[in-house]
Image: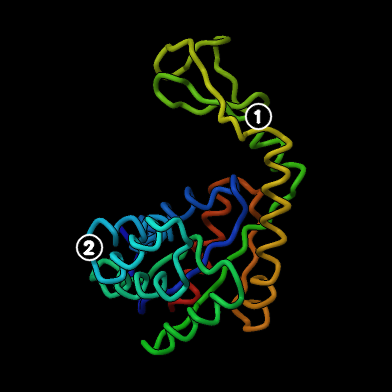
Amino acid sequence: MSETMTRAAVLILLGPPGAGKGTQARMLEERFGLVQLSTGDLLRAAVTAGTEAGLAAKAVMEAGQLVSDDIVLAILKDRMAEPDTAKGVILDGFPRTPGQAEALDALLSAQEMAIDAAISLEVDDAEMVRRVSGRYTCADCGEGYHDEFKQPATAETCDKCGGTAFKRRADDNAETVGARLTAYHASTAPLIAYYEARGVLRRVDGMAAIDAIATDLGAIVAEVTA
């Protein structure tokens, strides 16, 4: 059951790949009745639904071009008008640049809304490389394991289904993870500065335990919607 909120919240969740944004967003959805809005999911849904903005996006993508900010914002505006977003939204993957952030602010302002909090999950790069590069899963049921932190109770046998085949994502290696983190910090640093200057940036220890991060995020949501 979601907690009672006095007004709709608009949150941005920032964090590098592997920081647990998806896990935390799902927990916030359940606890507060928020809706996570990911740019990729929004585009696919709009194309499938055949909305005006979705058709425009489809034409651009079929031409092998990047969807413009105007189209993304139009799709976001349509989605935020749907009833299930009444308690608020968590934006994931947008904005990516200060220019997009300014356009988003203008869109929200026209609807008498604003960003309540841009929450940055702060991580230690070396530890993130260690965490992500050690991950692997059961090939049969998808149960997750780690070279250091979570190995099967019986070697090479899945605890959940008894399977003996395991797999790793090709990009879950130290070199690739390190490069993703470097790219993330470079692209996100201007956004961090943008939201810090506007007084809505919140920093949360992204290396803490999942429940501790959830507690910190929940406190922020409760505060900005009070």
Tag 1 secondary structure: loop
Q: Determine the image quadrant of residue 129.
A: top right
Q: Look at 41% across and 58% down and name the residue there.
A: 63
> Which residue is under mark 2?
50
Q: In which quarter of the image is the C terminus?
A: bottom left
Tag 2 secondary structure: loop
Q: Could you tell me the amino acid type at mark 1?
A: Gly
Q: Determine the image quadrant of residue 201.
A: bottom right
Q: Distance between the residues labelled 2 and 1?
A: 41 Å
Q: Look at 38% across and 58% down and name the residue there.
A: 29
Q: Is residue 113 left or right of residue 180?
A: left
Of circles 2 and 1, the one toward us is 2
Eyeballing the image, is 113 above or below 30? below
Q: Residues within 10 Å of mark 1 (few under 14, many from 20)?
A: some
Q: Look at 35% across and 78% down and name the residue there.
A: 6
Q: Toward the viewer: 49 or 30?
A: 49
Farthest right residue in view: 126
Q: Determine the image quadrant of residue 209.
A: top right
Q: Is residue 216 left or right of residue 193?
A: left
Q: Where is residue 202 in the image (x, y as percent from the top left)?
A: 62, 70
Q: Where is residue 93 in the image (x, y as percent from the top left)?
A: 51, 60
